[in-house]
Image (cartoon, rainbow, N blue to C red):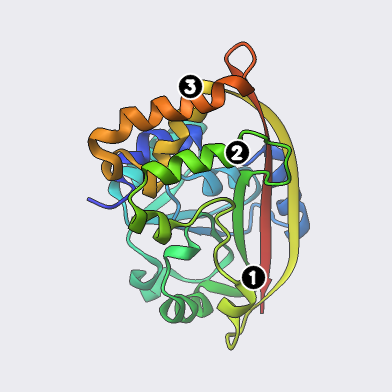
Amino acid sequence: MGRFASTASLYEHLRPPYPSEFFRSVAHKLGLTKQSSLIDLGTGPGLLALGFGPYVGRIVGVDPEPAMLDAARRAAASAGHALTLIEGKVETLSPDIGAFDVVTIGRALHWMDREPTLARLDRLVARDGAILICASFSATDGSNPWLDGYNDVRRRWSPAKLWEEAGMGTRTHRDLPAFFRGSAFQPTELVTVETSHTISVQDLTRRTLTYSSSSPEALGENADEMLRDVGQHLAPFSRDGAIAETVVSTAQIVKR
């Protein structure tokens, strides 16, 4: 069982959301049409793949975790989108899968091995295609005053080794210019969309379980105690059981 198996049922609904404005803005920037094809690497429950669904034709999602693929399959059926799902990693994709106009990578690049990933991307990206390195995260500019303490509680309960591996915050752990240095690709434009919403204290507390470093599998019998501590931290910031959250969604466009 992979490290995200125990998070699949929560991940789709509790991670900071990609808003519809984000997908619309990126699709417009890239000039996507129903003739465009997209492959989402590390698709998880299909958040990026299905978000771009209205703007492209062929959509493929790739993930090594069967539980995540099951979640993506259910989400695709609910959304009415045709989504081809492949269990595996970028390095294991069949050479005959073809090239795509857009390759999306969300909260997954930091799990990928650089050299084999770059070699595979060179074949996956169509001649005039683009890679999108996407992230959606709680704004760290002070507009979410509960965030630092929230992460502190997670850090205290997370096994140290897993916390160091997974990192924290925006999930943009890779130095992208360094990652693509020496390859055919380089980062170009960055699309940023900032939105605000409210989330229940219960859901924001349970979001902690969607991270590999504080997943039910990682925490074991300590999960309930961590949730209690997180809830206690969030309570003073809530109103009628809800908390305001500012979310930043980004897409770093990478091209040849």
Q: Residues within 10 Å of mark 1 (few under 14, many from 20)?
A: some
How much space separates mark 3 and mark 2, taking CA atoms? 15 Å
Left or right, 233 with reference to 141? left
How much space separates mark 1 and mark 3, taking CA atoms? 41 Å
Residue indicated by mark 3 = 202
Left or right, 244 with reference to 38? right
How much space separates mark 1 and mark 2, taking CA atoms? 36 Å
Residue indicated by mark 1 = 129
Q: Secondary structure at mark 3?
A: helix
Residue indicated by mark 2 = 147
Looking at marks 1 and 2 on the same chain, the residue that comes earlier in the sequence is marked by 1
**Rendered residue at 46%/55% (across/down):** 60
Q: Is residue 211 above or below residue 228?
A: below
Q: Quadrant of the C terminus?
A: bottom right
Residue 62 placement (x, y as % from top left): 40, 57
Q: In this orientation, which residue lies closer to the viewer: 35 or 126?
A: 126
Q: Secondary structure at mark 2?
A: helix
Report how many numbered discs are placed on residues in the image. Answer: 3
Which disc is residue 45 wearing?
none
Q: Is residue 38 above or below residue 66?
A: below
* Residue that extends furthest to the top in the rendered view of this protein: 240
Q: Is residue 121 above or below residue 18?
A: below
Q: Are marks 1 and 3 in contact (CB under 8 Å)?
A: no
Residue 164 placement (x, y as % from top left): 42, 60
Label 3 or label 2, whichever lies nearer to me, is: 2
Looking at marks 1 and 3 on the same chain, the residue that comes earlier in the sequence is marked by 1
Mark 2 is on which residue type? Leu
Q: Residues within 10 Å of mark 3 (few under 14, many from 20)?
A: some
Residue 225 placement (x, y as % from top left): 33, 29
Q: Secondary structure at mark 1?
A: strand
